């Protein structure tokens, strides 16, 4: 009897060990980052989704809507090729959750988003490009984007144009349209100086997709939503902002997805990866060149000395 007991104990140990060393199941095909294009009927807007594996089988993620910042998804359901999740409102004054239902078809993510206003809109998603660079950048000659005299080389996002050029300063004296360069860029080094009154807010969008926050954040702790942060994604290592009314100086380098932000002479974000588009982006076509895009719909703001050094 003792020998029989020992035999079964060894057999159980063998199967337990074999199970412990069994190959894990392949990761669900939904995992990764997705650039979304949403059809709102009267306009097409960008959005973004990231799905990650947490532990053995639980899927979690992040979502960026047309506006706002990246929102965490506590659980992403993915069964038989179909995805579903819901998240509570962010800036919308409502109690309605945002709900996504989708499936993968021919390598694309296709489905609907019911937004926090209860509207259901179709979308199509494509896998976000990695934007890896295999060689060190080679820079072209610097280009002055604002001539200090007029708005040549710039265009507004809407017809409500409040922007003007005066004494070497590009001014937005009130909330109105955003403004962007007519030229588009891939990798670059950007020098830009910005000033705003107390309590105001703006942003510098890189390739028109990634917002480096401009805000009266003096006296606050660093946060991705405050001055110097890549909105909702990257938090500065220190708060380098000066008081409102003073000129703030940014030197920003973007290579692929990797960004370095120097604010008022201090490196506050160093060679960090931007996961995806931020709220307010022009589009979700991350693999394409894009403009320098300045926010003018959140309060008065002024810019000067805007110089870009493009990659070759």
Image (tube, grey):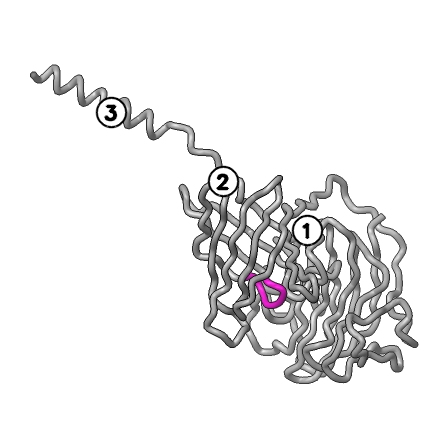
Q: Start and end of the magenta stretch?
A: 65-70
Secondary element at tag 1: loop
Q: Nearer the viewer, mark 2 or mark 3?
A: 2
Left or right, 57 with respect to 15, comes to: right
Which residue is under mark 1? 257
The residue lying at 59 percent from left, 61 percent from top is: 121
Q: Quadrant of the N terminus?
A: top left
Residue 67 counted in the magenta span = yes
The answer to whether residue 236 is visible is no
Q: Which mark is residue 13?
A: 3
The residue lying at 52 percent from left, 68 percent from top is: 118
Residue 274 counted in the magenta span = no
Which residue is under mark 2? 28
Say whether disc 3 or disc 1 marks the residue closer to the N-terminus: 3
Left or right, 101 with respect to 34, comes to: left
Say whether disc 2 or disc 1 marks the residue closer to the N-terminus: 2
């Amino acid at each position: 009897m003792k020998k029989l007991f020992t035999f079964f104990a060894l057999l159980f140990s063998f199967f337990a060990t074999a199970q412990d060393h069994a190959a894990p199941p392949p990761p669900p095909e939904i995992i990764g980052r997705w650039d979304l294009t949403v059809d709102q009927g009267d306009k097409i807007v960008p959005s973004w989704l990231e799905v990650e594996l947490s532990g053995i089988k639980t899927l979690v993620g992040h979502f960026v809507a047309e506006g706002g910042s990246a929102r965490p998804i506590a659980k992403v359901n993915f069964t038989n090729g179909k995805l579903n999740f819901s998240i509570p409102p962010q800036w919308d004054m409502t109690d309605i959750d945002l709900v996504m239902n989708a499936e993968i078809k021919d390598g694309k993510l296709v489905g609907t988003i019911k937004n926090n206003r209860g509207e259901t809109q179709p979308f199509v998603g494509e896998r976000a490009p990695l934007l890896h660079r295999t060689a060190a950048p080679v820079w072209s000659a610097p280009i002055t984007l604002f001539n200090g005299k007029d708005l040549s080389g710039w265009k507004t996002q809407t017809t409500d144009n409040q922007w003007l050029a005066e004494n070497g300063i590009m001014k937005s004296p009130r909330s109105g349209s955003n403004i962007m360069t007519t030229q588009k860029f891939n990798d670059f080094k950007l020098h830009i100086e910005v000033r705003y009154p107390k309590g105001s807010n703006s942003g510098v969008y890189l390739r028109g997709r990634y917002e480096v926050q401009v805000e009266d954040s003096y006296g606050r702790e660093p946060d991705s939503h405050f001055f110097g942060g890549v909105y909702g994604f990257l938090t500065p290592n220190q708060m380098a902002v000066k008081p409102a009314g003073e000129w703030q100086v940014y030197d920003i380098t973007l290579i692929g997805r990797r960004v370095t932000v120097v604010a008022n002479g201090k490196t506050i974000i160093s060679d960090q990866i931007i996961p995806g588009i931020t709220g307010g982006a022009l589009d979700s076509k991350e693999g394409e060149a894009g403009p320098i895009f300045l926010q003018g719909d959140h309060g008065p703001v002024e810019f000067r000395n805007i110089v870009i050094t493009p990659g070759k």
